[in-house]
Amino acid sequence: MTTTAPIPYHPNTMIALANLTSSSSSDDHLAAGYFSFRLFFLQDIQILELFLALFVFVAIRSLRQKKLQGLPVWPVLGMLPSLAAGLRTNMYEWLTDVLRHQNGTFRFKGPWFSSLNCVVTSDPRNLEHLLKSKFPNFPKGPYFRDTVRDLLGDGIFSADDDTWQRQRKTASIEFHSAKFRQLTIESLLELVHSRLLPVLENSIKQSIPIDLQDILLRLTFDNVCMIAFGADPGCLNPGLPEIPFAKAFEDATEATVFRFVTPTCIWKAMRHFNLGTEKKLKISIKAVDEFADDVIRTRKKELSLQSDHIKKQRSDLLTVFMGLKDEDGQPFSDKFLRDICVNFILAGRDTSSVALSWFFWLLDQNPAVEERILEEICGIVGEREEVKRGDQCESPLIFRAEEIKKMDYLHAALSEALRLYPSVPVDHKEVVEDDVFPDGTVLKKGTKVIYAIYAMGRMEAIWGKDCREFNPERWLRDGRFMSESAYKFTAFNGGPRLCLGKDFAYYQMKSVAASIIYHYRVKVVENHPVAPKLALTMYMKHGLKVKLDRRDESELQKYFKIKY
């Protein structure tokens, strides 16, 4: 029988055994820790993979919606990320691209519980439906009024029903009166020859570029104040004085538009806490109100000192509205008169000046069109008896009202500029009762509808393959101007809300454009950036910097000799 010899006792031996035991235990703990860490790490990897897979699934699903709905639809956010991207570039071009791929109509889905859901359309059939055929079913609506009320109040642009009808009826009667028409012609003549041309001439003498958009805004501001309020702010006086109202009004329209692309709860919170664009809007509206209040106060003081006979001689809109009563038989409040002032300034100042700014930029890009306009102007002036006799034209040349009306090619060129760059690029309606558009789009009660006027001018289905080209000839038939349907060319709106000042706007634009083109060559400063600004009207974001050169007599005589 074999026996194992006992291990003799030795201190070092015992220590070695203890170390061996301890080492074995430590290795076990390390192994357990390693496996626990690996298991935990693998769980993290699985959770990460799960989130990644979920994100990819949501992204693919959202992007697939783009084919069906025009834009990706994200959970919670809806189409807001795409809108934010569009706002960082050219908003109107972005919207045009979406509409082109969606055959002219799409539904915009905003974030959950937001006010940004709407139908956007550029289809002429839909526009005729909402602007004319079913006009009572598509008012401006409470959302629009609530959004613009701080600036426009209850004026004609935002009002509906009786409030709108009363203002429009009064303005319509005045716009079509012979006295008012004479006032518009005389005031414009004075502004062009006593202020505009001297200011342009001064820029030539000083050999400095000018911001033509600023000059035109000053001109139309003075003009609308003269005919609407009987006041002359002198915005286009020599030295171009700073008019705080003008800048404040532009800032206010820009801040107001920002509300339309922001969830209502957010901009209302910003207004409450006086933050960001709402702070800017509040400051701007204060300056706008001060100007309007001063105009009203001054007019009331003047009227109190005048006899009834002189009062009846006045034909400005403000005086007319001051003489009327509200539904309770009381004179209109100062607040209502303020809203009248602000709305007619928006209508008369911004639209024509903005349109003329884009027109002169387009002429710079298309010199052949400018030459054709000059030929037409000289051809019409050449019909004067004194010119036929070989006498010199008066200097500076003053166009007669009947000559302005004969300028068909200029009329066509201005219409073409408005087609491509409408002064009001988008407009808004709201559905009163469930309806269906002619293109099949279902509209539920309360749906907001945006009609994209800028996009309409760039639709091949409406204007043909050359829709992006500046081509005044598309408006001419046998050399005569031919207008298009108001639901195809919606720069002046359509239906019962067709712009009351359309004829005056054309006369104003033609008179100003003819006077500038006849006397000067207008060249945009090289590398000047040109882009639209996001506002109620489509200002040029950076203005329009131009240099002017005076036309000499020999150049003009060349056009007089051309058989027109």
Image (cartoon, grey):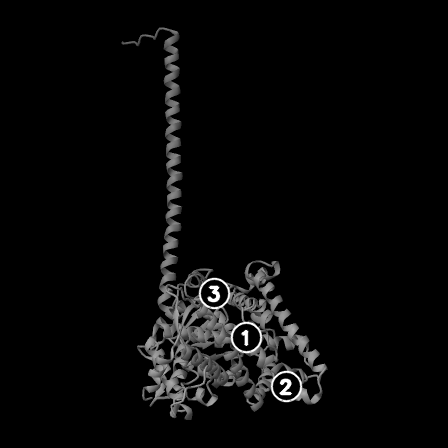
Instruction: Identify the image quadrant of the C terminus.
Output: bottom left
User: Residue drawn at (47%, 88%), measured in percent from left and top?
Assistant: 400
Left or right of 306? Residue 396 is left
Can the viewer see residue 426? no
Q: What residue sits right under mark 2 in the picture?
A: 314
- Indicate the secondary structure of the residue bearing disc 3: loop
Residue found at the very far left of the displayed protein = 1
- Asked if marks 1 and 2 touch (Cβ < 8 Å), the reply is no
Residues at marks 1 and 2, CA–CA distance in whole angstroms: 20 Å
Q: Residues within 10 Å of mark 2 (few under 14, many from 20)?
A: some
Could you say which quadrant of the image residue 23 lies in? top left
Q: Position of residue 437 (x, y in %)?
A: 44, 80
SS category of the residue bearing label 2: loop
Query: What's the residue type where badge 3 is placed?
Result: Gly
Q: Give the percent coordinates (x, y) of residue 512.
A: 46, 79
**Residue, disc 1:** 221
Q: Which residue is mark 3?
A: 110
The kind of residue tagged 1 is Phe
